[in-house]
Amino acid sequence: MFIEIILAITLGIASGVITGLTPGIHINLVSLLLLSAAPLLAPFFGLLGLACFIVAMSVTHSFLDSIPSIFLGAPDSDQVLGVLPGHRYLLAGHGYTALKLTVIGSFGALLLSILFFPLFVLIVTFGYDYISGYIGYLLLFVVVFMILRDDKKLWALFVFLLSGVLGFFVLNIPVLKNPLFPMLSGLFGVSTLLVSVNANESLPEQCIDDNLKLSNILVFKALLSGQFSGFLTAVLPGVGSGTAAVLALQFARKLGDKGFMILTGSINTVNFILSMVTLLVLDKARNGAIIVVKELVEGVTLNHVLVFLSATLIAGGIAVFLALKIGRVFSKVITVINYRKLVIGIILLIILLVFLLCGWLGLFVLIVSTAVGLIPAIVKTTRTQAMGCIMLPVMIYFLL
C-alpha cells in the first residue's frame, strides 16, 4: 500500500504540473476523468492511492497556476486578481520575483494550514451555522467598502453592477460548460493583454533575483489574510477564491503588491487543504476535486486526513522546486520573443481553448467579458470591481 500511495503522489505531482501550466485545464476535469476510470485503476493504486493522486495534483496545481497568469496573462479562475500586479512585475522585468512571491504564499499557506488544522476543525464543529448565516452581509459590507474607497465611485459602481449582471447570467446558463473560464479570461486576461500590447512592443530583460528581501511582518500578515480568505472558500458554499481575495484585499490594503502576490498565492492552497476540514467534520465537499475524493474514500476519517496531509507536504515541497525551476525557464524564454506577437498568440490560444471547452456560446461570453474588462482601464478605476461577476451572484445566493 505504501509503494502504491507514493507512486500515486508522484503521478499526481506530474499531472498538477500539466494542469497548472495549461490555461483552461482544471484539476476538477482531471479528477472527474480519474473517477470514471477508477474501476480500472483501483487494482493498481487502491482507492486511497487514487485519492492521494488528486490531493497531490491539486496542491501542485496551486503552486504552478500562477506561472501562466504572470507570464502569459492567462488566468486560472483562482488567480484572476494575481494577473494585475503580476503583469506589472513582468512589464518591469521582475516576473520571476512575482512568481517567487506566490510560491512563498503557497508554501507558507501549506505549513500554516496544517498547523492550524485542529483549530479550524473546532471552529467548523461549533461555529459553522453561525458563520454561514452572516456571510451575505459581510460581502455586502465589503462591496460598499470597495466602491467608497475608489476615487471614481460612480464608475466603480457601474463596473461592479455591469460585471455582476454579466456574471449572474453567465453562471445561470445551463448549456454553457466551464462558464468561469471565458468570463474571467475576458474580464482579466484578454482585456489586460489588449491594454499592454498597445503600450509595449517588447518585454524588458527579466531579472532573476535569488535574494528577495521581505519583511517578516509583511509575510505573516499576508499569510494570515490568506488563511482567513481560504477558510471562507473552503467552508462556505458559493464563496470562491476570487471573492475571498477581494475580501482579504479590503482588510489588507497596506500589504502592497508584494504582500498581495503572497496573498493570492496562498488562497488557493489554503482553500484546498482546509476543504478537508469540512469533509472530515461536515462530510461535505466544497470543490470538485474533494467531491471526487469523497466518492473514492467513503466515510473519510481522521486517519485518511492524516494521509492526505502527508501527501500535501510531499507534493508542496516538490512543487516549490518545480515552480521556481520552470519560472526561470519562462523568464529567459519570454524575453527573446517579440512581445506583441506573443500577446496576439496568447489571445488566439485563449480563444481556441474557449471554443474547444465552451463552444460558440463561450466565445460570445469571452467577447462581452473582454469589452466589460476594458472599461476600468479606459476610465481609470480599480479593476477589482470587475469581481462583481462572482460577488454579486454569491450575494444574491446568500441574501435572497
Image (cartoon, helix red, strand yellow):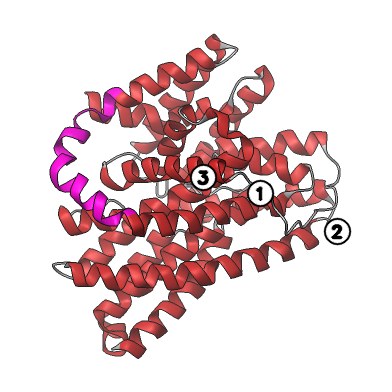
Q: Main secondary structure of the magenta part?
A: helix
Q: Residue 336 carries which label?
A: 2
Indicate whether residue 122 is drawn in magenta: yes
Q: Which amino acid type is shown beneath numbered disc 1?
A: Ala
Specify whether 113 is left or right of 383: left
Estimate the x, y position of residue 256 in percent, counting from the top left: 61, 34
Looking at the rendered structure, the secondary structure element under dot 1 is helix
Residue at which label 3 appears: 264
Looking at the rendered structure, the secondary structure element under dot 3 is helix
Estimate the x, y position of residue 183 in percent, counting from the top left: 50, 39
Mark 3 / mark 1, whichever is N-terminal? 1
- Residue lying at 23% horizontally and 27% vertically, measured from the top left: 134
Residue at which label 1 appears: 98
Distance CA(mark 3)–CA(mark 1):
11 Å
- Residue lying at 39% horizontally and 80% vertically, measured from the top left: 8
- Residue lying at 19% horizontally and 53% vertically, measured from the top left: 284
Looking at the rendered structure, the secondary structure element under dot 2 is loop
